[in-house]
Amino acid sequence: MSDTPKGFDEIRCLDAPLATRLAAYVRYLETANVDVSEIYRAIIKRLVDSGAGAQAPAVGTALPDFLLPDSDGRLHGLSDMVSRGPVVISFNRGHWCSFCRLELLALAEVHGAIAERGATLVSIMPEVATEVTRLRAGLSLPFPVLTDIDNGYALSCGLMVSLGPVLREYFLGRGTDLARFQRNDGWFVPIPATFVVGAGRRILGRFVDPDFTRRMAPEELLDFLPEIA
């Protein structure tokens, strides 16, 4: 894997906001895995400088529709989901990404509050069902993780980016092969993003940042979901 589990497990247990946990993991990598920390900084700079994510759908516009499978093969359609209430969508890079795992754990903590507001929460990532099943079980996630094979949906949302050859070479040298996880050798992932979507797939709130060490605070996304009287 791409990081030392001990550091992740210590940080995931912190009684602190998600932003604090993410920042703690950045600091951990800077000392425990200098090589990957430097590679990550270079990737973030490349993505920021290129304006990655700038074409993602804006608040007030309609998020593209999707029909994606969960780890059990059940299909989930966005139009159908929003007909029953708001939907919170979290794009994540994959099970190998510790920043994504920290975010998913934080979302699991507020899953009950999201459901109380009549909303549905799903994660979307470009990994096959076997990897998604393992991820959900390992983190005890109470919400579906949908497979966006070949990043087709992420591309339609302006979120698909390349990890680049340097990280690819580094990961492959340590046994982390995204081609095995994705059944695709392109080494593309989505920019981590969160969308809160209402009726007609209209975006009520969103967080899109090419710096994948940053994520929407769970308490912030709750602000976009009205409480049910």
Image (cartoon, rainbow, N blue to C red):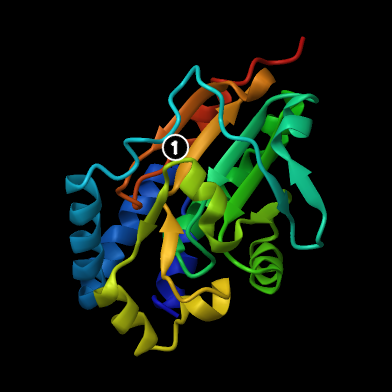
Q: Nearer the viewer, residue 56 or 70?
A: 56
Residue 155 in sight from this viewpoint: yes
Give the quadrant of the N terminus: bottom left
The residue labelled by disc 1 is 216
Q: Residue at x 46, y 30 (%)?
A: 206
Q: Position of residue 133 (x, y in %)?
A: 71, 68
Kindly tell me whether residue 16 is visible in this rendering: no
Furthest residue toward top: 229
Q: In which quarter of the image is the C terminus?
A: top right
Q: How crowded is mark 1: few (under 14 residues within 10 Å), some or many (20 or more)?
A: many
Query: Is 161 left, or right, of 94 in this rendering?
Result: left
Where does the image place residue 89, in percent across and percent down from the top left? 59, 39
Q: Give the side of residue 191 with respect to residue 204, left or right.
A: left
Frontmost residue, 56 versus 92: 56
What residue do we see at 61% from left, 49% from top?
123
Work out whether 145 lies above or below 118.
below
Amino acid marked by disc 1: Met
Measuring from the top left, give residue 70's x and y in whole percent. 74, 56
- Residue 6, image quadrant: bottom left
Q: What residue is drawn where x is 44% and y is 48%?
A: 192
Q: Where is residue 93 in the image (x, y as percent from the top left)?
A: 47, 59
Name the residue rendered at 62%, 21% in the picture: 225
